[in-house]
Image (spheres, rainbow, N blue to C red):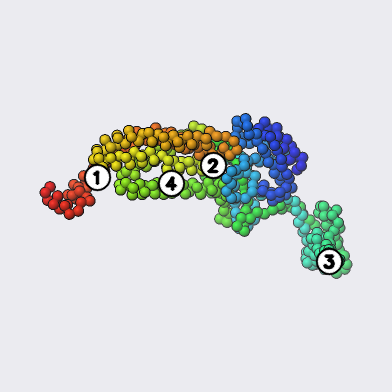
């Protein structure tokens, strides 16, 4: 393992964007249970002058010499600024199979791994199932042992005395005490051949263990992982650059259903992938709740059911602008980008609020027509709208154009804000007055219809009957 680790370290160090490579063998965090057949490597990339992202550098290393070293496999993943739960693994995203017995989980986990290899974009696919450890199973000829007067307990005691480190005595001294542990010499437990040197006490004296037993080499798991007190196997994977997580999650769940697993085997994503699933499940409800809250607040402010719709009509252009900016810059619609789109709800609607607030006030106090009121609002509110939009847009440019450590996390937020503000600023100056006028005419038609159906305009008190009779 030491030689293979040195080969991998040299292969990674040969990449032009790698500056420092350090690592160690053993230890936890890689799904190997801290065994010596695993190692961890920490790689530092060059900061100034590097044109590729961390994921692109990883893809280049994956295609290089590191993929041709036999006897071991190298898994690489970028350090995550936000890591949400999950167990330590060799890749970023995790899918866990859990069951009520180890045999079924051990049988279906390799099938799931083989099926997931066909999913486009999945790389570094591996699992924490290590069931190839060597084990010597002792097979007892019970009939022969019974003829010799040897019980199963006597065999168990003999094996425990030889290999179980039984404490047989305690040596007391003035300042300390020492436990005396009995076991065979190390040269006898290096391989199963040491069993033929053991003797078991029978009715007629000492009997060689090999006279009535033999051993069979089998495999055994090095470690059995558990999730919620049940045995489990965690499959971890990375994504190739340019492949989103959403389709991979859906295809993985479809594969689980198509394999026909028994009812006692359950599969679910964990860690970052589970957080992604939860965010997708709650995303429509959260956005709808935000829009409803904004509508209620604006309706109470303007005492109208129509004007809040005029203000909310500016939001689609902001969302389209954010998505177009993400597409033009080849940036994924991540959770951070989604946060930027939600932030646009509060930033963009202020353009319409500044116009509608002035127009409604002018229409009510100065008794202007809707056309005159909104025209006056467009003239007088153009400068503050432009100033506030440019302030927010220029404030987001450092996020969209910045580099350095952690820029991959901040850049989608800046791109979404800048793209949404640019398109919404251009469109809402033209669309908001149009929507205001059309919804105003719609409101007047509804009032006329109610007056025609009821015979009086709604909202009048005592004069209603006299107005109706005169009419």
Against 59, is 184 above or below?
Answer: below
Q: Earlier in the sequence, mark 2 or mark 1?
A: 2
Q: Looking at the picture, how far across and down is residue 23, in whole percent?
A: 71, 42
Picture residue at 36% right of the left edge, 41% below the top: 353
Does residue 418 appear to the left or right of 203 in the view shown?
left
SS type, badge 4: helix
The residue where tag 2 is placed is: 245
Badge 4 local density, few (<14 within 10 Å), some, or many (20+)?
Answer: few
Q: Kindly report which numbered mark, 2 or 1, lies closer to the viewer in this rendering.
A: 1
Question: Cα distance, mark 2 to mark 4?
Answer: 21 Å
SS type, badge 2: helix
Q: Earlier in the sequence, mark 2 or mark 3?
A: 3
Q: Kindly report which numbered mark, 2 or 4, lies closer to the viewer in this rendering.
A: 4
Question: Cα distance, mark 1 to mark 3?
Answer: 98 Å
Residue placed most toward the observer, 460 or 222: 460
The residue where tag 1 is placed is: 446
Does residue 191 appear to the left or right of 393 in the view shown?
right
The residue where tag 3 is placed is: 170
SS type, badge 1: helix
Picture residue at 80% right of the left edge, 63% below the top: 166
Which image quadrant is residue 141 in? bottom right
Q: Earlier in the sequence, mark 2 or mark 4?
A: 2
Against 186, is 60 above or below?
Answer: above
Question: Cα distance, mark 2 to mark 1?
Answer: 48 Å
Picture residue at 52% right of the left edge, 38% below the top: 412
Picture residue at 59% right of the left edge, 46% below the top: 83
Q: Kindly report which numbered mark, 2 or 3, lies closer to the viewer in this rendering.
A: 3
Against 224, is 75 above or below?
Answer: above
Q: Looking at the picture, how far across and down is residue 128, in whole percent?
A: 65, 48
Residue 238 seen: yes
């Amino acid at each position: 393992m030491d030689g293979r680790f040195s080969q991998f370290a040299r292969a990674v160090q040969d990449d032009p964007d790698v500056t420092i490579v350090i690592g160690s063998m053993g230890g936890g965090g890689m799904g190997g249970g801290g065994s010596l057949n695993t190692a961890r490597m920490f790689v530092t990339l060059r900061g100034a002058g590097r044109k590729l992202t961390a994921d692109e550098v990883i893809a280049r290393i994956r295609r290089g010499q590191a993929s041709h070293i036999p006897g071991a496999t190298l898994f690489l993943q970028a350090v995550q600024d936000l890591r949400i739960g999950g167990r330590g693994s060799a890749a970023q995203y995790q899918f866990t199979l859990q069951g009520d017995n180890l045999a079924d989980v051990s049988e279906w986990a390799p099938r799931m791994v083989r099926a997931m290899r066909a999913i486009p974009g999945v790389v570094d696919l591996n699992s924490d199932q290590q069931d190839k450890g060597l084990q010597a199973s002792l097979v007892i000829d019970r009939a022969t042992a019974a003829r010799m007067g040897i019980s199963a307990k006597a065999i168990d005691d003999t094996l425990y005395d030889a290999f179980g480190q039984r404490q047989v005595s305690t040596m007391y001294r003035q300042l300390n005490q020492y436990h005396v542990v009995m076991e065979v010499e190390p040269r006898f437990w290096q391989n199963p051949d040491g069993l033929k040197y053991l003797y078991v006490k029978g009715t007629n004296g000492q009997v060689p263990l090999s006279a009535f037993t033999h051993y069979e080499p089998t495999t055994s798991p090095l470690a059995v992982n558990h999730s919620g007190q049940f045995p489990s196997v965690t499959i971890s994977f990375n994504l190739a650059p340019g492949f989103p997580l959403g389709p991979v999650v859906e295809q993985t769940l479809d594969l689980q259903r198509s394999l026909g697993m028994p009812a006692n085997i359950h599969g679910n994503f964990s860690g970052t992938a589970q957080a992604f699933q939860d965010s997708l499940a709650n995303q429509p409800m959260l956005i709808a709740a935000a829009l409803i809250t904004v509508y209620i607040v604006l309706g109470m402010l303007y005492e109208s059911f129509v004007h809040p719709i005029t203000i909310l009509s500016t939001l689609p252009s902001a969302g389209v602008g954010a998505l177009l900016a993400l597409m033009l810059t080849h940036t994924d619609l991540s959770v951070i980008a989604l946060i930027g789109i939600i932030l646009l709800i509060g930033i963009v609607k202020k353009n319409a609020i500044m116009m509608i607030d002035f127009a409604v006030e002018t229409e009510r106090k100065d008794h202007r027509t809707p056309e005159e009121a909104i025209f006056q609002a467009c003239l007088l509110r153009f400068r503050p709208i432009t100033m506030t939009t440019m302030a927010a847009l220029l404030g987001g440019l450092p996020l969209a154009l910045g580099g350095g450590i952690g820029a991959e996390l901040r850049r989608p937020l800046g791109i979404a804000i800048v793209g949404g503000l640019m398109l919404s600023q251009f469109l809402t100056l033209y669309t908001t007055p149009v929507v205001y006028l059309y919804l105003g005419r719609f409101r007047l038609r509804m009032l006329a219809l109610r007056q025609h159906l009821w015979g009086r305009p709604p909202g009048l008190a005592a004069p209603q009957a006299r107005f109706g009779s005169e009419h």
